[in-house]
Image: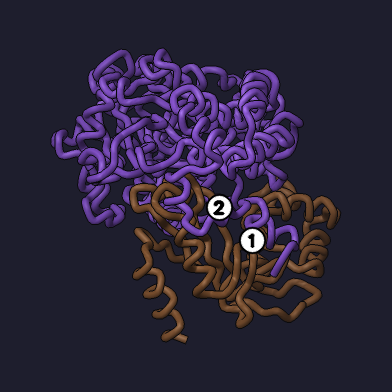
Amino acid sequence: MSTQLNDPLTRPLTKNIREDRRPTDMAAYEANDGYQSLHSTLGKRSPADCLQIIKDSNLRGRGGAGFPTGMKWSFVPMEDATPGHKYLVCNADEMEPGTFKDRWLLECDPHQLIEGMIISAYTLQADIGYIFIRSEYLLAAQLLREAIADCHAKGYLGDNILGSGFNFELHVHASAGRYICGEETALINSLEGKRANPRAKPPFPQVSGLWGRPTIVNNVETLCNIHHIVQHGAQWFQNLGIGSDAGTKLYGISGRVNKPGCWELPIGTPIRDIFALAGGMEQGYELRGFLPGGGSTDFLTPEHLDLAMDYDTIGKAGSRMGTGTMIVLDDKTCAVGFVKNLVEFFAQESCGFCTPCRDGLPWSAQVLDDIQQGRGTSEDMNTLARQIGFIGAIGNTHCALAPGAMEPLASGIQYFREDFERHLNNGHCPLCHEHNPKGKHDSQHKGQQGVSQGVAS
Amino acid sequence: MMSSQIIPSLSAAELADIDAEISHAPYKAAVAIDALKIVQSYRGWVSDESLKAIAQHLEMSPAELDGIATFYNLIFRQPVGEQVILLCNSVTCWIKGYEQIREQISQHLGVGLGETTTDKAYTFLPVTCLGACDKAPVMMVGDELHEHIDRNDLTQIFRSREQAQ
């Protein structure tokens, strides 16, 4: 938690979160202004007013893409000619490598998400909500189910909430484990009980989503902001940010830093300040580079440390802010192994629907393995370049998974080519040797699929 | 508790849990993933017989349901040990020593990834980023998340479990 910002209104998302990570229960949540937005909004402010506040606030989606939330919501038909359900879905399927921000919000302050979802659903006039949470977040799922029961007891969920005439039911859906479920249309297919293949767009989910009905899917952190914005206003939210973006952001750092962690800071905080909160690099380790926002973002290097951590600045530097949780590449870790780990992850998690992803990513992983094991040739670098050009181009694949996998690969070759050259020229790398002294390498594919596909038991 | 005994039909408790999910779904097949997880929670895994029984209850074909079951990493179509070890192999845990820890666990339990110990106590699997990268390296043993696992902690985790049995 940040020690720089002590006024709760300057760090709305984490104001209830304590150092010991004890979950905030209904009593503690309400004692600190909780559900005040609910009381002051439902039946007292029109959904159209709420939508206008969200649009004016310049909130952008915190799941990684950074799409303006108000604009996304504005595509939901409000005067629907075909009456039926509308759905609000919280994407709590946090599985991007190096990302650990939503777990913090879910485990420490479940009521904040629920209040955010009720106000969001009211704004969209959605009557059913789902929290799509990854299977491994057992504590968070349990806390959310308890919090939902507490809300029913208080009349905050269910029919005619606080006498406003607004109805909203909220369910927790625990996933069965697959990264692609984080893609919103794949998530919708998974909620329908199907394989999580992304859908073709259009139609967009806002018009035809879950069971063919209007559906909004938003990230946990995005939804946690909503009721604060509606309560305190668009201008208050805009003032929280330092640069062109609005609000706060959960920033994190993991890897060889002294104090890996997550902090709520004004969006646009310089990267160097976030590294300072992490206590700098561990003794004996130098910073070589970092992925700014999860495993599917391009590397940045120490020369980028003074950049503001916001969507446009990081975009201009050739990467993406993504989830805002950085992964550090130190000088004792080989970029070839680092990138191979990520490409293997994306190859394993491909849904298998389109050829460039299903067949291209395992090919890239194989080429990287050849290089790492000392079997590589300079022709392999040309092969990787061709793969990056083909798989990395938006439009060649069904969704953004495979292009995302190419981001750390392309930028890894760009910035750390000497690591690749060392493997190609020497057939051996002291950094990789240190990581894996016995020289054994597992295949994530074999291990992961061993049980579900019956290879071994 | 899991059982390796094959029960041809679903138990009353399993049916009740599945029907509770169906009660707020627009049609039965919509709860396919929930139903697979419910049966797995009672039996540890999903056998062919269970799969057919679930498919019949949800009014869908066993082939379609198996296509769904095998898509997801955490639906087990083979028997697993009493506890599943999910060792994070994503990038931050890899930086912080995943490969050495994998070797240590393999040596301690005498199994590789994807395998179950001969006493059926553990199945050892890798898992994608567990969302606890600030506490890397991490793993789950059963329902419990273990953070900052290094060599000493590892022996402690397995020793305390063995003593409890």
Residue drawn at x 31%, y 25% as measured from the top left? A302
Badge 1, how many Cα within 10 Å: few under 14, some, many 20+? Answer: many
Q: What kind of residue is marked 2? A: Ala
Considering the numbered disc 2 on the image, is that residue within a helix, a strand or a loop?
A: strand
Which mark, residue A174? 2
Decide which of A322, B92 is in the foreground and name it.
Answer: B92
Judge by depth and name the residue closer to the eye, B164 or A367: A367
- Element type at marker 1? helix
Considering the image in quadrants, where does the N terminus of chain B appear?
bottom right
Residue at x 49%, y 47% (from the top left corner): B90
Please rate how many residues cluster around mark 2, counting C-alpha atoms within 10 Å: few if below 14, some from 14 to 19, many from 20: many
The answer to whether A8 is drawn above or below residue A27 in the figure is: above
Chain B takes which shade in the image? brown
Query: Visible in this render: residue A105?
Result: yes
- Residue A144: x %, y % from top left: 43, 52
**Most extreme residue toward the front, as rendered?**
A426
Where on the picture, by quarter, is residue A427?
top right
Q: Amino acid at mark 1?
A: Lys
Q: In whole angstroms, how far apart are the C-alphas of marks 1 and 2?
A: 9 Å
Residue A62 placement (x, y as % from top left):
42, 30
Residue occupying the point 50% across, 61% down: B102
Q: Nearer the viewer, residue A309 or A287?
A: A287
> Chain A, which colour?
purple
A43 to the left or right of A443? left
Residue at 61% in and 82% down: B119
Where does label 1 land, which residue? B37
Q: Establish if A91 lies above or below B139.
A: above
Residue A388's place in the image compared with A164, above or below, is above
Query: In the displayed structure, would residue A226 be above or below residue A27?
Result: above
